[in-house]
């Protein structure tokens, strides 16, 4: 009886964020098509009623999941990177951590694969613009004039996206371990060289 009460309390405590996080996991595992209410409810150990308490429909959940992705994968990352003491340290940490973590997380590749979906397209546009603007600012803080900072920021972001795609489509072509870090350091050195 006590366990049933604990389960009810657990179900009652699910938040919209819990649903959004579960939707993001599903997108990473099976693309946008994997966002379905009943399987997510089963994954969360709850009923569809919990979903409808927080969301009017699947599109609302997708919108919340995409907003959550933007917050955790962009805004929170920027906040963390900004704790570094200077622009050189910031850009180095961002480039290496983001590129390495992209190999382990299939979410962004899954989102890129569904870029024709209107909600995903809008979120990708906002996130990409924010990220490129941020990296551009880092290059400007390194002393590059605005047009050159923008070009390098876009190039750095393109390297990140390409590396992410390779890491999921053909991981055997990428170096591993220390060799990967040396490879990324060399790419970063080329991007930051005056």
Image (cartoon, grey):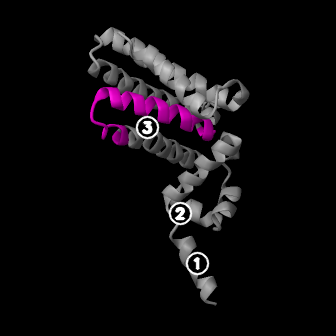
Give the mark toward the camera: 3 or 1: 3
- Circle 2 SS class: helix
Q: Tell me if label 2 and label 3 are in contact, CB under 8 Å.
A: no
| The quarter of the displayed image where residue 166 is located | top right
Label 1: how many residues lie within 10 Å, few (<14), some (14-19) or many (20+)?
few
Taking the view exactly as shown, the residue that stands out farthest to the bottom is 1
Question: Which residue is label 2 attached to?
Answer: 53
Whole-number angstrom distance, CA of label 3 to CA of label 1: 34 Å
25 sits to left or right of 144: right
Residue placed under numbered mark 3 in the picture: 74
- Which quadrant would residue 192 be assigned to in this image? top left
Foreground mark, 2 or 1?
Answer: 1
Name the residue that disc number 1 marks.
8
- Residue 158 place in picture, x, y as percent: 52, 19
Q: Distance between the residues labelled 2 and 1?
A: 15 Å
- Name the chief secondary structure element in magenta: helix
Q: Which region of the structure is painted magenta?
A: 79-107
């Amino acid at each position: 009886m006590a366990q049933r009460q604990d389960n009810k309390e657990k179900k009652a405590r699910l938040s919209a964020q819990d649903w959004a996080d579960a939707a993001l996991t599903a997108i990473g595992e099976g693309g946008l098509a994997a966002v379905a209410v009943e399987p997510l409810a089963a994954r969360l150990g709850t009923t569809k009623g919990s979903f409808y308490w927080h969301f009017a429909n699947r599109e609302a959940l997708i919108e919340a999941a995409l907003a959550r992705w933007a917050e955790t994968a962009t805004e929170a990352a920027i906040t963390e990177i900004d704790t570094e003491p200077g622009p050189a340290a910031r850009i180095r940490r961002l480039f290496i951590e983001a590129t390495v973590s992209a190999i382990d997380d299939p979410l962004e590749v899954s989102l890129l694969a569904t870029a024709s979906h209107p909600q995903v397209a809008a979120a990708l546009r906002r996130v990409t613009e924010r990220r490129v603007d941020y990296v551009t600012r880092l290059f400007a803080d390194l002393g590059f004039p605005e047009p050159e900072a923008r070009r390098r920021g876009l190039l750095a972001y393109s390297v990140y996206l390409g590396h992410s795609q390779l890491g999921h489509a053909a991981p055997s072509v990428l170096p591993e371990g220390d060799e990967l870090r040396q490879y990324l350091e060399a790419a970063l050195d080329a991007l930051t060289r005056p």
